[in-house]
Image (cartoon, rainbow, N blue to C red):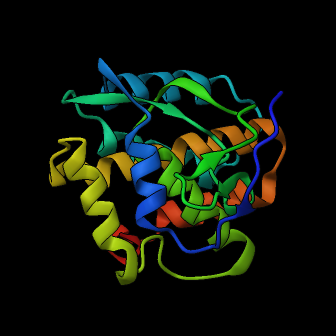
Amino acid sequence: QEFVSGSPTGRRLTEGHAAFLVDLVIPGETMSLHEVVEDLERQIKILEDIDLEAHTELERVLVEADDPSPLPVVWEHGDFAPWNIKKRKNGPLRAIDWEASSRRGLPLFDLIFFQSAQMFLFGGNELFPKSIKRLLHQYLERLSIPPLLTDKIVKACIALDWLRCYKAGDRPRAAFLIRTLARPLGDLV
């Protein structure tokens, strides 16, 4: 364990957050949404108590998200929220509480988690309000991810977060994520 000084960042996504996440790219490693979708389908298939509405929505979303295009692999923090990110004087942001992290993460997961956790806790209608869409596009550009894949990645990330919440027994957040997936994505991104 290590002590990290600094104060928690605010609830607004900043260029510092995006720059921090760009630095988590694992050079030379790729993955595809197809791999992620196959894994999600396998894991969802073995869930015995999933309700019909959630199952139907997830099936629809996974069909839409499936894509063989290569994407960069990133270290995924997994709980990238304002209370887990420290701002230091004259230094880059630092993240704490890496217990939900993954070495083989999907780009955008942490940005989407950052926004959706706050939508769930504090309300809101847009996953990426106009004020931060520029950051989203800069992040994608810096990772050389074509804009056409954005909707697919967002859907896969929300489905991944749903699965984590569902398995952890966080049914209210899982239900919120299903409702988020059911909305037209244009309203969110």
- In the figure, residue 89 lies in which quadrant? bottom right
Front residue of 49 and 122: 122
* Residue under the point 32% across and 72% down: 133
The x and y percentages for residue 33 are: 33, 32
Classify 144 as above or below 112.
above
Classify 163 as above or below 170.
above
* Residue under the point 54% across and 35% down: 76
- In the figure, residue 23 lies in which quadrant? top left
Residue 106 placement, left or right of 71: right
Instruction: State the count of labels.
Output: 0
| Quadrant occupied by the N terminus | top right
Front residue of 8 and 121: 8
Classify 120 as above or below 122.
above
The single residue placed furthest to the top in the displayed view is: 28
The x and y percentages for residue 63 are: 33, 40
- In the figure, residue 4 lies in which quadrant? top right
* Residue under the point 55% across and 74% down: 12
Classify 104 as above or below 3.
above
Can residue 146 be seen in the rendering of this structure? yes
Residue 107 placement, left or right of 99: left
The x and y percentages for residue 127 are: 48, 70
| Quadrant occupied by the C terminus | bottom left
Residue 154 placement, left or right of 11: left
The single residue placed furthest to the front in the displayed view is: 90
Residue 156 placement, left or right of 102: left
Front residue of 44 and 126: 126
* Residue under the point 62% across and 47% down: 94
Front residue of 113 and 90: 90
Can residue 178 be seen in the rendering of this structure? no
The x and y percentages for residue 85 are: 66, 54
